[in-house]
Image (cartoon, rainbow, N blue to C red):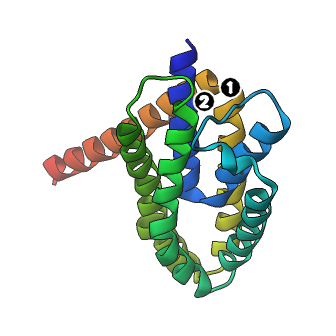
C-alpha cells in the first residue's frame, strides 16, 4: 500500500505543478522540513534548505502576481511551459524515490508528461477560452481558483493520496462520460436532420 500511495502522491504533485510550478514544490519542502509526513531522500533533500524554501516563497509570489496581470499572464504561461513540466518531473521523482522501485528516468518522464499535459490544457485551452468569453475579466478569478486547486491538490496528494486517486478516477470518468454524452447527442441530432 505504501508504494501505491507514493505513486498516487507523485501523480497528484505532478498534476499540481501543471497548474502552478512553485506551490507543490513549496508544499513538499515545508512538509519535509517541518513534519514526518514526507521524507525526501538524496538528491532531493536540498529542497528542505532555508535558501530553497526562501527562493520558492519568492517565486510563488512572483508567479501569483504575474498570473493575475492582463497580458503578463500569457507571457507567464509561455515561460511556465518549460518550468511546470520540469517541476512536475522533480516532484514525481522526489516523491516516488523513497518508497518505490520506479526507475528515476521513468519517474522524471512521467512527471514531465503529467505536468506538461495539465499545463498544456490550462494554457492552450482553458485560459484562452476564459479570455475570449469574458473579455479577460475572468482571468483573475480563474487564476485564483487554479492557485487554490494547486494548493489543495498538493496537500491532498501528501495527506490522503488514496482518496485523491479515487477522486481523480471519478473526475476522469465524469469527463469521459460528458464527452461521450455530448458526442452521442451530436450524432443523434445529425441523424434527425
Pointer 1 with pointer 2, Cβ within 8 A: yes
Q: Nearer the viewer, residue 138 or 3?
A: 3
Q: Nearer the viewer, residue 121 or 160?
A: 160
Residue at 74% x, 66% y: name it.
Answer: 55
Q: Position of residue 23 (x, y in %)?
A: 69, 55
In-image side of 179 versus 126 (left or right): left
- Label 1 and label 2: CA atoms lie apart by 6 Å
Give SS at disc 2: helix
Q: Which mark is residue 160?
A: 1
Foreground of the two, 178 or 7: 7
- Left/right placement of residue 64 relative to residue 181 reads right
* Left or right of residue 86: residue 141: right
Disc number for residue 107: none
Q: Give the quarter of the figure containing the C terminus.
A: bottom left
Which residue is rendered at x = 51% and y = 41% of the image? 92
Q: x and y percent of residue 36 in the render?
A: 79, 27
Q: Which residue is mark 2?
A: 164
| For residue 161, above or below residue 116 | above
Q: Residue at x 58, y 32 (%)?
A: 9
Give the SS element for disc 1: loop
- Residue 47, position in %: x, y? 68, 50
Residue 149 seen in render: no
Mark 2 nearby-residue class (10 Å; few <14, some 14–19, many ≥20): many
Label 1: how many Cα within 10 Å (few below 14, some 14–19, many 20+): few
In the rendered image of this protein, does residue 69 appear above or below residue 27? below
Is residue 98 something one can see in this rendering?
yes
Amino acid at each position: 500500500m505504501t508504494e501505491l500511495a507514493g505513486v498516487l502522491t507523485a501523480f497528484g504533485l505532478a498534476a499540481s505543478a501543471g497548474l502552478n510550478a512553485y506551490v507543490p514544490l513549496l508544499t513538499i519542502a515545508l512538509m519535509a522540513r517541518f513534519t514526518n509526513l514526507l521524507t525526501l531522500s538524496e538528491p532531493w533533500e536540498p529542497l528542505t534548505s532555508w535558501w530553497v524554501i526562501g527562493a520558492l516563497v519568492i517565486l510563488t509570489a512572483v508567479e501569483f502576481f504575474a498570473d493575475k496581470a492582463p497580458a503578463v499572464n500569457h507571457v507567464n504561461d509561455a515561460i511556465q511551459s518549460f518550468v511546470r513540466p520540469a517541476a512536475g518531473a522533480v516532484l514525481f521523482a522526489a516523491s516516488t524515490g523513497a518508497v518505490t522501485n520506479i526507475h528515476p528516468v521513468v519517474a522524471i518522464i512521467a512527471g514531465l508528461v503529467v505536468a506538461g499535459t495539465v499545463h498544456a490544457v490550462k494554457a492552450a485551452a482553458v485560459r484562452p477560452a476564459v479570455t475570449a468569453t469574458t473579455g479577460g475579466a475572468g482571468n483573475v478569478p480563474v487564476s485564483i481558483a487554479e492557485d487554490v486547486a494547486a494548493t489543495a491538490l498538493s496537500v491532498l496528494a501528501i495527506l490522503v493520496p488514496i482518496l485523491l486517486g479515487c477522486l481523480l478516477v471519478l473526475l476522469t470518468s465524469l469527463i469521459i462520460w460528458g464527452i461521450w454524452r455530448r458526442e452521442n447527442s451530436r450524432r443523434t441530432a445529425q441523424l434527425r436532420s
